[in-house]
């Protein structure tokens, strides 16, 4: 299932935050930083148009930030610095804090909750129906008090836009991590989370450095439960977001996708031998039910395959739309692995290629050979700028120029009106050739057509029709005459036969 924002299909994904766009959301107490505005995530976010279905919009907006990385200072909030001190754009919405993380009173503090709240507010979700906490524990308590929380053990199946809460092993609090539910299927819940680790990371996923997609078994004890804000939704909305496709359970390479997973002595999870961090890949040599036998860090044991993905089992497609300027082959992107956008620069007569947008008519987001990091399908659309000008002339057959204008390749031509100075003339005017969109210099000449000849042709046709009608009438009359004559002859013969009998 795909949506870019057009999800990316975006996917995909032009009106969201104040300071970013003026069409949808006004966050009076927040203005995007210059660092953020300079980055790709601001550009991607700015292309998204709200649908009015808040569940859909929440997930779509979150996905525009997929791959964002935290920085080490206020200058690193563009999202691509790969820092490690929790400086992110999302914390700016809530102001500076000191969470004893070594950054003092600053924007550098753990940001999973501020990311989710930032997304909610960007989707125009009122804090009175969603909460506005940057503390996961406080947020859970707030939702519980509003009867908007479902425990994992309740058997509730999460849906698109729900808020998912986690509890890591390093805390005694009710929750210390939060994310957004993209969807769930086949006993797996798929999420997007901030302040977590992607497949390349090995740190605690409750305090990682980026925004990533994750997946967990619905029974995973790491999950505390789900917040269910009272969203405004639209009937008939299809939450068709692209979910991660898990490979069949068979021997092969598997990567830990959700959080660290345990390596056990047996498939019954009786004795835990080691923890395998998120993002690590192991080779499974034997499968028994939902467990696979493998070796990690010199120790052999069994791992649960729930929440693990085949290392070569999930792909995303990057395709190209050049609008008739030749084909560029699509590319396959392995889940969790960055790729380089095609280096091919398309060529189109009378135009200069400026870059790639993520939707038709959108702003430039990528250039050839840029890195594509999102784990989403996307169609990149060529952005062209007309360069060469062409002259289009309209004139009369005596050489009088009616109009002469410059156009770019593919433009629609403005056609001057043709009128005759003498209304009683027997001539009519038209152009000597079909008028098309601009593809080069061209001259159109008005030509005269004899109106009287045309009318005579029409009259001849009418005369022919009259002749046909007259001939038909004569035939009918002659037929009647013949019938009457035949009747008279028969009557006369009959009369002659009766005469001798009368004598």
Image (spheres, rainbow, N blue to C red):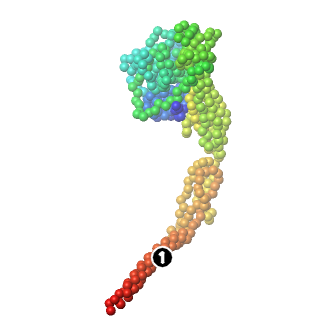
Residue at 46% across, 14% down: 175
* Quarter of the rendering occupied by the C terminus: bottom left
Seen from the viewer's position, the closer of residues 325 and 259 is 259
Which corner quadrant of the image does residue 78 belong to? top right
Please tell me how crowded label 1 is: few (under 14), some (14-19), or many (20+) other residues with Cα within 10 Å. Answer: few
Residue at 55% across, 57% down: 416
Furthest residue toward left: 502
Label count reads: 1
Residue 108 place in picture, x, y as percent: 53, 17
As helix, strand or loop, the secondary structure at mark 1 comes to helix
Residue where numbered disc 1 is placed:
471
Residue 85 visible in the snapshot: no
Residue at 51% across, 10% down: 170
Seen from the viewer's position, the closer of residues 192 and 409 is 192
Furthest residue toward bottom: 503
Residue 291 place in picture, x, y as percent: 55, 16
Seen from the viewer's position, the closer of residues 390 and 490 is 490
Q: Is residue 268 above or below residue 231?
A: above
Residue 142 place in picture, x, y as percent: 39, 17
Seen from the viewer's position, the closer of residues 11 and 354 is 11
Q: Is residue 388 above or below residue 17?
A: below
Taking the image as shown, residue 148 lies to the left or right of residue 250, namely: left
Taking the image as shown, residue 459 lies to the left or right of residue 335, namely: left
Residue 285 place in picture, x, y as percent: 62, 16
Taking the image as shown, residue 119 lies to the left or right of residue 202, namely: left
Residue 215 visible in the snapshot: yes
């Amino acid at each position: 299932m795909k949506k870019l924002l057009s999800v990316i299909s975006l996917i995909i994904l032009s009106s969201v935050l104040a300071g970013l766009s003026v069409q949808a959301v006004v966050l009076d107490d927040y203005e995007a930083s210059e660092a953020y505005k300079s980055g790709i995530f601001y550009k991607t976010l700015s292309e998204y148009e709200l649908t009015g279905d808040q569940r859909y919009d929440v997930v779509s907006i979150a996905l525009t930030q997929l791959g964002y990385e935290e920085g080490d200072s206020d200058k690193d909030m563009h999202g691509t610095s790969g820092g490690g001190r929790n400086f992110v754009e999302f914390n700016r919405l809530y102001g500076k804090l000191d969470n004893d993380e070594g950054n003092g009173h600053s924007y550098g503090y753990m940001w999973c909750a501020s990311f989710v709240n930032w997304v909610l507010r960007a989707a125009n979700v009122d804090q009175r129906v969603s909460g506005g906490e940057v503390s996961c524990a406080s947020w859970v308590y707030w939702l519980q008090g509003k009867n908007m929380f479902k425990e994992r053990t309740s058997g509730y199946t999460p849906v698109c836009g729900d808020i998912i809460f986690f509890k890591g092993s390093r805390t005694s609090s009710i929750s210390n991590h939060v994310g957004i539910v993209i969807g769930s299927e086949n006993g797996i819940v798929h999420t997007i989370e901030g302040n977590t680790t992607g497949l390349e990371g090995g740190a605690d996923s409750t305090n990682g450095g980026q925004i990533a997609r994750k997946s967990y078994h619905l029974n995973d004890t790491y999950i505390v439960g789900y917040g269910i804000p009272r969203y405004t939704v639209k009937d008939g909305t299809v939450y068709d977001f692209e979910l991660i496709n898990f490979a069949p359970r068979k021997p092969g390479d598997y990567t830990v996708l959700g959080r660290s997973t345990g390596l056990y002595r047996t498939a019954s999870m009786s004795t835990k031998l080691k923890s395998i961090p998120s993002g690590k890949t192991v080779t499974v040599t034997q499968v028994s039910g939902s467990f696979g036998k493998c070796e990690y860090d010199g120790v052999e044991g069994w791992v649960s395959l729930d929440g693990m993905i085949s290392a070569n089992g999930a792909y995303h497609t990057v395709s190209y739309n050049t609008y008739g300027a030749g084909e560029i082959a699509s590319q396959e992107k392995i889940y969790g692995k960055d790729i380089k956008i095609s280096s091919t620069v398309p060529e189109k007569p009378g135009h200069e290629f400026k870059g790639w947008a993520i939707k038709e008519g959108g702003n430039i987001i990528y250039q050839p050979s840029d890195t594509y990091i999102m784990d989403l399908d996307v169609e990149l659309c060529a952005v062209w700028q007309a360069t060469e000008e062409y002259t289009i002339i309209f004139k009369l057959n005596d050489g009088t120029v009616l109009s002469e204008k410059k156009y770019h390749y593919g433009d629609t031509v403005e056609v001057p009106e043709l009128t005759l100075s003498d209304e009683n003339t027997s001539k009519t005017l038209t152009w000597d050739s079909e008028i098309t969109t601009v593809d080069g210099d061209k001259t159109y000449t008005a030509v005269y057509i004899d109106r009287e000849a045309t009318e005579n042709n029409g009259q001849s046709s009418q005369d022919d029709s009259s002749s046909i009608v007259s001939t038909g009438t004569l035939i009918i009359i002659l037929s009647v005459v013949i019938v009457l004559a035949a009747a008279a002859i028969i009557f006369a013969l009959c009369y002659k036969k009766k005469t001798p009998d009368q004598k």
